[in-house]
């Protein structure tokens, strides 16, 4: 069936740049035009609105986003006491394990984490509180015992050698995986659906799902594959595994995604070249050089696009050095194919100028999370406290990435930050360094066409042109011209020709 969407303005991000209507034939755009209306079986009148291509979010954790939406009071907690009280309410009367996500102690007046005794007083059942970045969890004694993690690396201990309840690294992964297995398949589906519905309500028509078997087991992505065609938005899956055969057996042309080479700055686990300013050590990297090289080479040789998570400058250096080692073995033709693959680095928060040049020389693609800078990158924020201003000031150099010719797309890393393209646009415009800020038009193109290109979907997504997917969103206020983007939501979202969200 052909449907005509008629608005005051259609911005195509293609040619012609503007029109007054979009003709959709099934799942695809047939035409964009002005003036005389073409024939259609159905006409949707959207007077006074502006239609844009649907946004593409390059970094989402669907199940985790669903969990986060179920317990918003955890993220809202402004102190240790508020966090414990919110956890107590959520766990009250439950006989099943309780996992809650989203606390951020860096925003509290006194960033003191609860101890094991505090956590044990909340619930007699297994309890896990996950930090906003996912790289640190707090667990009570029943959870530590049930998950069998007391002997795992990453269990923080007090001066007497007893566990404090805080877990990072392998201990965090094992704990999270144990909790994930306690959730029935139907509940996992519901969490994923809730997250996808949120995306549609925000004008996002495609998400790049960063599936994390180390945290949730392979079942999580298997459940997603079973019902992804019924979700309200299109889903591109990246599987964070080192098992190339496993990704290929699932029919996935991509591997890695958010596969962590290091941790996070908030948890002091991002791999740094110099120590943290407010704590001991230089964080962690999770692969030996040869181990990482074996993964990257094997996945590239298998024809897969590869993505890895690298935040700290030491982790970024390791990833670039390893890719250069592989690139150096290729002849000219093979190097051209290597560059065309657009292997990805997620986050890329602490690159030096040399790192940016080397990434560009390799043809790597970068998935950035602008809301990280808005939340933690400004003077006095988390990054300055962890790193000192000299290092924090150079983080997330969005304009430098574009000027050096890198492929760049935009993601939220939801549930770490809100699945909201308007927040991302505002963050790109309001970078802590004025020299790194983008214009509104540049930001929108980055979050549509740029993000589509990270998954080789140019011509299909990110623009409205004949043959492209019918992915669009209509707004009462034109996002190109809105003075304040906060809270701006579409009145209608269409994904693959389906009207998936309206108000």
Image: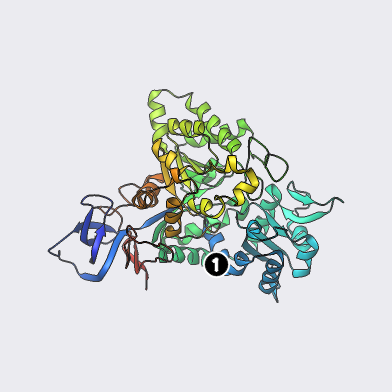
Q: Residue 438, can we see it?
A: yes
In this rendering, position of residue 299 left or right of residue 499: right
In this rendering, position of residue 17 left or right of residue 339: left
| Residue hosting label 1 | 69
Asked if residue 340 is positioned above or below residue 458 in the image, the reply reads: above
Q: Is mark 1 on a helix, strand or loop?
A: helix
Instruction: Between residue 261 and residue 272, name the one nearer to us.
Output: 272
Instruction: Between residue 270 and residue 426, name the one nearer to us.
Output: 426
Instruction: Between residue 71 and residue 355, name the one nearer to us.
Output: 355
Q: Which residue is farthest left? A: 36
Q: Quadrant of residue 105?
A: bottom right
Residue 23 placement (x, y as % from top left)? 22, 61
Q: Quadrant of residue 57?
A: bottom left
In this rendering, position of residue 92 left or right of residue 247: right
Asked if residue 51 is positioned above or below residue 434 in the image, the reply reads: below
Residue at left offset 56%, top offset 57%? 416
Residue 384 placement (x, y as % from top left)? 61, 47
């Amino acid at each position: 069936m052909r449907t005509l969407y008629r608005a005051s303005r259609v911005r195509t991000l293609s040619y012609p740049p503007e029109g007054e209507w979009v003709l959709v034939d099934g799942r695809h755009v047939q035409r964009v035009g002005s003036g005389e209306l073409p024939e259609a079986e159905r006409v949707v009148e959207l007077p006074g609105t502006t239609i844009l291509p649907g946004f593409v979010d390059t970094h989402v954790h669907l199940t985790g986003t669903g969990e986060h939406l179920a317990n918003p009071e955890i993220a809202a907690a402004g102190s240790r006491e508020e966090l414990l009280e919110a956890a107590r309410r959520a766990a009250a009367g439950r006989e099943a394990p309780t996992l809650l996500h989203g606390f951020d102690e860096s925003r509290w007046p006194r960033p003191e984490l609860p101890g094991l005794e505090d956590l044990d007083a909340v619930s007699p059942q297994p309890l896990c509180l996950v930090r906003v970045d996912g790289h640190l969890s707090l667990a009570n004694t029943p959870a530590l015992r049930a998950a069998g993690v007391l002997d795992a690396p990453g269990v923080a201990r007090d001066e007497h050698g007893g566990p404090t309840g805080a877990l990072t690294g392998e201990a965090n992964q094992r704990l999270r995986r144990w909790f994930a297995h306690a959730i029935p398949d139907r509940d996992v589906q519901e969490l994923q659906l809730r997250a996808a519905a949120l995306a549609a309500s925000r004008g996002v028509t495609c998400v790049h799902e960063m599936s994390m078997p180390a945290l949730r087991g392979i079942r999580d992505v298997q459940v997603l594959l079973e019902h992804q065609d019924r979700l309200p938005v299109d889903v591109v899956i990246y599987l964070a595994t080192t098992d190339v055969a496993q990704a290929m057996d699932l029919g996935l042309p991509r591997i890695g995604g958010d596969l962590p080479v290091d941790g996070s700055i908030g948890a002091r686990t991002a791999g740094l070249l110099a120590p943290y300013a407010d704590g001991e050590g230089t964080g962690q990297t999770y692969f030996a050089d040869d181990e990482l090289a074996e993964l990257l080479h094997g996945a590239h040789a298998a024809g897969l696009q590869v993505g890895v998570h690298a935040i700290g400058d030491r982790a970024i250096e390791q990833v670039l050095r390893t890719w250069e080692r592989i690139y150096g073995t290729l002849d000219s033709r093979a190097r051209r194919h290597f560059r065309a693959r657009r292997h990805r680095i997620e986050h890329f928060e602490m690159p030096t100028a040399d790192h940016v040049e080397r990434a560009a020389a390799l043809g790597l693609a970068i998935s950035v999370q602008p809301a990280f800078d808005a939340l933690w990158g400004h003077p006095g924020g988390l990054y300055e406290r962890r790193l000192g201003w000299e290092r924090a000031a150079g983080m997330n150099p969005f304009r430098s990435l574009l000027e050096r010719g890198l492929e760049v797309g935009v993601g939220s890393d939801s549930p770490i930050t809100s699945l909201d393209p308007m927040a991302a646009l505002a963050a790109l415009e309001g970078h802590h360094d004025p020299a790194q800020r983008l214009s509104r038009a540049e930001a929108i193109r980055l979050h549509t066409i740029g993000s589509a290109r990270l998954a080789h979907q140019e011509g299909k997504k990110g623009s409205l042109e004949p043959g492209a997917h019918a992915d669009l969103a209509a707004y009462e206020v034109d996002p190109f011209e809105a003075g304040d983007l906060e809270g701006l939501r579409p009145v209608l979202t269409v994904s693959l020709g389906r009207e998936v969200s309206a108000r």
